[in-house]
Every structure is written in C-alpha cells, then in structure tokens.
C-alpha cells in the first residue's frame, strides 16, 4: 500500500514539466486515501453515475409532450415508459448490486491481493489512450457475447431476455440485467484495466464515461448534442442504433462503437425524421 509519509515530502510547488494531473492525484492520496483505495469505489462510481445520468431523462419521459423542445427528439414517440416500468428497472439494478455485486466485492477482498496505488498520476495522453483501449476491448467482448446470446435461443431466454423486456428502451432500463449478464459485464469491467495495466485514475474516469455512454444508448432520444453526433464519422452508435436494436434485435449488437456491426453486416440505421 502507498506510504503516506513519502508523499508528505513532495514539494507543494510543481514544475511546468510535471504531469498536469499530479496535484489532483496527490490530493486524492493525501486526503482521500481510504476512499480511493477502497474496493467499493468502482461500485460506488458506477451505481451513482447510473443514478445521476438516468434521472434527468426519466423526468423528461414523465413530462413527455409538455417539454416539446426535447420530446420532438423522442425516437419512439408512441411508446413512453410509465413510472411503474421505471421503478421496476431501477429496483432490479438496486437488488442486483446489493445482493450480488457487493457480496462479490467482499469475497474478492479476501481472495485477491491488495492493489497498490502508484505515486505518479497519469499523463493526459495516458488517460486518453488507456480509456480508449478499455472501451475498444469491452466493445469487442460485448459484441461477441451479445451476438452469441441473440443467436442461441436458450442463452437468450435464460440470460439476455431480461434486458429486452421493453421494445422502447429508457434510461433506467440501462441496467435492467439478469444476474449472469451483470456478472459477465462486471467481470470484464474489472479485468480489462488489469490486463491493459491501466492507471487507477484512468479506470475510474472511463468507468464514469462508459456508464454515461450506456445510459445515452438507452435514453430513447436522438438528441443532436449526444456523443454519437459529436464524435465524427458515425464511429459511435448511440441511442439511434441501440433503440433500433430493441426494435429489431438482429441488428446493432455493439454497445458503443459501430465498426464491428459494419464489418459483420449487422449495422442498421434509423430513418431520419424532420424535427423542425
């Protein structure tokens, strides 16, 4: 484990050549060591991000036509989630985290070695490249897993059908998952940064970003300022692609990027509609 006394000897003044994130990283290690070294931090980050990112879109869904500025971008305007549907999806995620994720973390505390926190912060370039590598690796893993579970009827029924309960996805349904699917996604999310030897700060940042991208996939709105529109060349599928997957499950298997669906001929696009 990190030796706090060593950090206290560091000068509070930083040269221009020092890493830009080093002051922030030192602050975390000096003042929040118990939090950043806790095995529960990734769970807290993931679930709190899911809650905070989903809530505004849940409000939009409940308001519906009373907020025309946003409702005009609703992909399936004839299908709106009810408060009961939202509560069911949220409670499914909460139940899964309390009775499966948290026990798995506790068990891991006893059988896995205690991770060490590096003294140096990542560079901005390292933060970007490590984050991108994690996203690309997970995207590949889930594309294969997703494709197989849609092609095998038994796997689909027993594992993935829970997520396809609703033809029109909404923000809270992002984490409406069966236990096997949740544990699979969780396993990759924890293993990939280890395999790629990523800095903890990179891992935490990409955890929050990936949750945002997942929620954005499920919001049911083709908003012009979402990542799928801001990132050029159609590299991200976003809500239009995943919404269509829930309508036509033989398309758009990748969770984030679009390249695997293009390569294997499973990419499908929504027909554009006039929202002026």
Image (cartoon, rainbow, N blue to C red):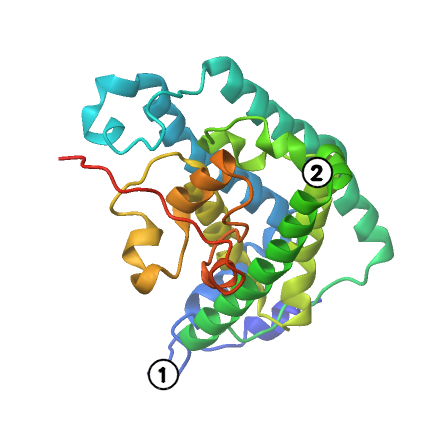
Residue found at x 63% / y 49%: 146
Residue 19 image-quadrant placement = bottom left
- Residue 29: in sight, yes or no? no
Select label 2 or label 1 by which is in front.
Answer: 2
- Residue 224: in sight, yes or no? yes
> Residue lying farthest left?
276
Q: Which mark is residue 15?
A: 1
Please give left or right for residue 224 compared with residue 99 in the image. left
The answer to whether 176 is drawn above or below residue 205 in the figure is above
Residue 251 locus on image (x, y percent) = 51, 47
Graded by Cα atoms within 10 Å as few (under 14), some (14 to 19) or many (20 or more), the crowding at tag 2 reads some
The answer to whether 99 is drawn above or below residue 224 in the figure is above
Residue 221 locus on image (x, y percent) = 34, 35
Residue 76 locus on image (x, y percent) = 36, 28
> Residue lying farthest bottom?
17
Query: Which residue is at the front of the view, 159 or 123?
Result: 159
Q: CA distance from mark 2 to mark 1?
A: 56 Å
Graded by Cα atoms within 10 Å as few (under 14), some (14 to 19) or many (20 or more), the crowding at tag 1 reads few
Residue found at x 61% / y 75%: 6
Residue found at x 42% / y 46%: 241
Q: Which residue is mark 2?
A: 156
- Per the image, label 1 sits on a secondary structure element best described as loop
- Per the image, label 2 sits on a secondary structure element best described as helix
Please give left or right for residue 133 compared with residue 19 in the image. right
Query: Which residue is at the front of the view, 83 or 125?
Result: 83
> Residue lying farthest front?
265
Quarter containing the C terminus: top left
Quarter containing the N terminus: bottom right
Residue 262 locus on image (x, y percent) = 46, 61
């Amino acid at each position: 484990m990190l030796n706090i006394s060593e950090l206290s000897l560091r000068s509070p003044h930083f040269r221009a050549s020092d890493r830009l994130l080093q002051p922030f990283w030192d602050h975390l290690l000096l003042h929040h060591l118990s939090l950043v070294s806790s095995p529960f931090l990734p769970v807290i980050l993931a679930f709190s991000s899911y809650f905070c990112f989903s809530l505004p879109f849940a409000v939009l869904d409940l308001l519906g036509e009373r907020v025309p500025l946003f409702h005009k971008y609703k992909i399936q305007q004839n299908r709106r989630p009810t408060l009961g549907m939202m509560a069911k999806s949220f409670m499914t995620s909460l139940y899964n985290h309390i009775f499966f994720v948290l026990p798995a973390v506790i068990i891991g505390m006893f059988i896995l070695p205690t991770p060490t926190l590096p003294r140096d912060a990542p560079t901005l370039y390292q933060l970007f490249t490590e984050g991108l590598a994690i996203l690309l690796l997970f995207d590949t893993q889930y594309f294969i897993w997703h494709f197989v579970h849609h092609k095998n009827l038994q796997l689909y029924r027993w594992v993935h059908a829970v997520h396809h309960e609703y033809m029109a996805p909404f923000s809270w349904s992002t984490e409406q998952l069966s236990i096997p699917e949740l544990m699979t996604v969780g396993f990759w999310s924890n293993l990939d940064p280890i395999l790629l030897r990523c800095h903890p700060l990179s891992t935490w940042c990409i955890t929050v970003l990936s949750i945002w991208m997942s929620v954005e996939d499920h919001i049911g709105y083709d908003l012009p300022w979402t990542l799928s529109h801001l990132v050029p060349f159609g590299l991200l599928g976003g809500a239009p692609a995943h919404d269509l997957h829930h309508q036509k499950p033989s398309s758009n298997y990748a969770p984030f990027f679009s390249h695997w669906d293009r390569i294997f001929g499973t990419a499908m696009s929504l027909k554009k509609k006039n929202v002026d």
